[in-house]
């Protein structure tokens, strides 16, 4: 249905839902955290529950339960049956138990919610104006190691949820060729490096990241017993002239470049190109907005772009594959492989273009 065919009465209803969306969101957070959604679901075989039952068993006031369930009923999260008892709808069930929904909900609530209030300022200044709600840092990546434990948990679960599931499939593809020396750029907590070491006993890796991130990654690698095969290299990609070592046959980046503006992506890729020999490969794995089969996946990526704007760095976003191809070409890279992996990801493999950079 096109926007032009929506009836006025339906359009105003949707507009009002948007106007009060933060109210519904926080009601859902409260319902979940107070155990109300879980309680209602567990009582489903008894024909639902009353407000009085919930209040008595969970030791929460009937008033509090009532205001939460009223807005939830209007929002199709719960329904009241003919006996006046509440049951979860399918939407309510997913809000309570669906892993991706809960990862997104926690990330929004613990990391993004307060900062998004400053979105307008961030748009005007191209700076992460909402970041001050979390800490006094240049970008969110500078402050990851200083966040509260709950904020860290929510951030890393969000970050890992959209990458970890594809590591096994990606490694099967990557190690169809012999790899002796790999750079894991944006190593984060070292998860990919550790999986590489477990997947192939001959490969050596260098994790490249900010100092705060590397400290945690090095600890994790050591705890797995791979510190004899893994090195670390500190870098600030926003510095004037970043450099990486030479000699790697493979440079790996997974959901890393979307953390930068187009100009800085070009800088990162040029830096990598300068360090590559003619046989080296650079592999980029991303979730591109123009490569999504499902509308809700595209929606999640576009919402994530606002996180980058308001909190992460003020200048980056979730990009289209066509944009990355153009930037890579300008950095002196030639696309060799374009592979879909998992439900949402694309893997690009590049070689150094013998003719050099376009710009």
Image: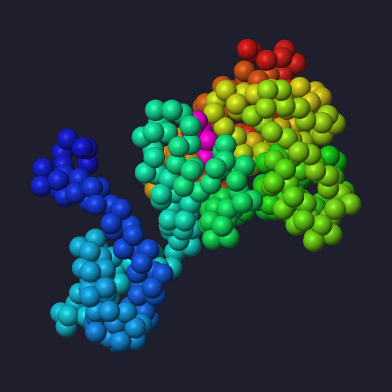
Left or right: residue 157 compared with residue 181? left
Q: Residue at x 24, y 52 (%)?
A: 20
Left or right: residue 309 compared with residue 347? left
Residue 11 position by quadrant = top left
Q: Which residue is drawn at 69% across and 40% down?
A: 210
- Is residue 285 visible in the rendered structure shown here? no
> Is residue 93 shown above or below 336?
below
x then y, percent, for residue 57: 34, 86
x then y, percent, for residue 99: 48, 62
Q: Residue at x 35, y 75 (%)?
A: 36
Left or right: residue 132 compared with residue 80? right
Front-most of residues 310 and 202: 310
Residue 29 position by quadrant = bottom left
> In which quadrant will I find the N terminus?
top left
Q: Residue furthest front?
A: 136
Front-most of residues 278 and 128: 128
61 inside magenta stretch: no
Q: Residue at x 51, y 27 (%)?
A: 322
Front-most of residues 120 and 53: 120
Left or right: residue 359 compared with residue 118? right
Front-most of residues 219 and 179: 219
Q: Give the range drawn in magenta.
A: 312-316
Q: How is the image coloured?
A: rainbow
> In which quadrant will I find the C terminus?
top right
x then y, percent, for residue 133: 46, 47
């Amino acid at each position: 249905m096109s926007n032009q065919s929506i009836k006025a009465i339906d359009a105003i209803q949707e507009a009002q839902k948007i106007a009060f969306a933060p109210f519904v969101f926080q009601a859902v957070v409260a319902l979940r955290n107070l155990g109300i959604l879980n309680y209602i679901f567990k009582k489903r075989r008894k024909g639902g529950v009353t407000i009085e039952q919930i209040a008595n068993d969970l030791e929460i006031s009937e008033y509090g339960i009532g205001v939460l369930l009223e807005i939830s009923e209007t929002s199709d999260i719960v329904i009241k049956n003919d006996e006046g008892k509440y049951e979860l709808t399918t939407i309510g069930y997913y809000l309570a138990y669906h892993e991706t929904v809960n990862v997104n909900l926690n990330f929004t609530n613990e990391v993004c919610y307060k900062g998004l209030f400053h979105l307008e300022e961030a748009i005007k200044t191209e700076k992460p104006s909402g970041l001050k709600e979390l800490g006094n840092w240049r970008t969110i990546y500078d402050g990851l190691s200083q966040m509260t434990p709950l904020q860290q948990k929510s951030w890393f679960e969000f970050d890992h949820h959209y990458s970890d599931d594809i590591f096994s499939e990606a490694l099967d593809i990557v190690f169809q060729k012999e790899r002796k020396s790999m750079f894991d750029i944006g190593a984060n907590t070292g998860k990919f490096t550790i999986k590489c070491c477990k997947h192939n006993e001959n490969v050596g890796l260098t994790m490249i990241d900010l100092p705060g991130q590397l400290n945690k990654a090095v600890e994790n690698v050591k705890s797995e017993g791979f510190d004899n095969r893994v090195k670390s290299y500190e870098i600030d990609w926003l510095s004037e002239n970043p450099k990486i070592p030479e000699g790697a046959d493979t440079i790996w980046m997974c959901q890393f470049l979307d953390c930068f503006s187009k100009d800085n992506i070009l800088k990162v890729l040029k830096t990598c190109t300068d360090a590559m020999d003619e046989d080296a490969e650079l592999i980029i794995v991303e979730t591109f907005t123009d490569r999504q089969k499902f509308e809700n996946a595209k929606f999640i990526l576009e919402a994530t772009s606002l996180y980058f704007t308001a909190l992460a760095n003020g200048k980056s976003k979730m990009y289209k594959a066509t944009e990355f191809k153009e930037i890579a070409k300008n950095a002196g890279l030639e696309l060799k492989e374009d592979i879909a992996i998992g439900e949402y990801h694309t893997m690009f493999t590049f070689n150094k273009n013998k003719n050099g950079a376009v710009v």
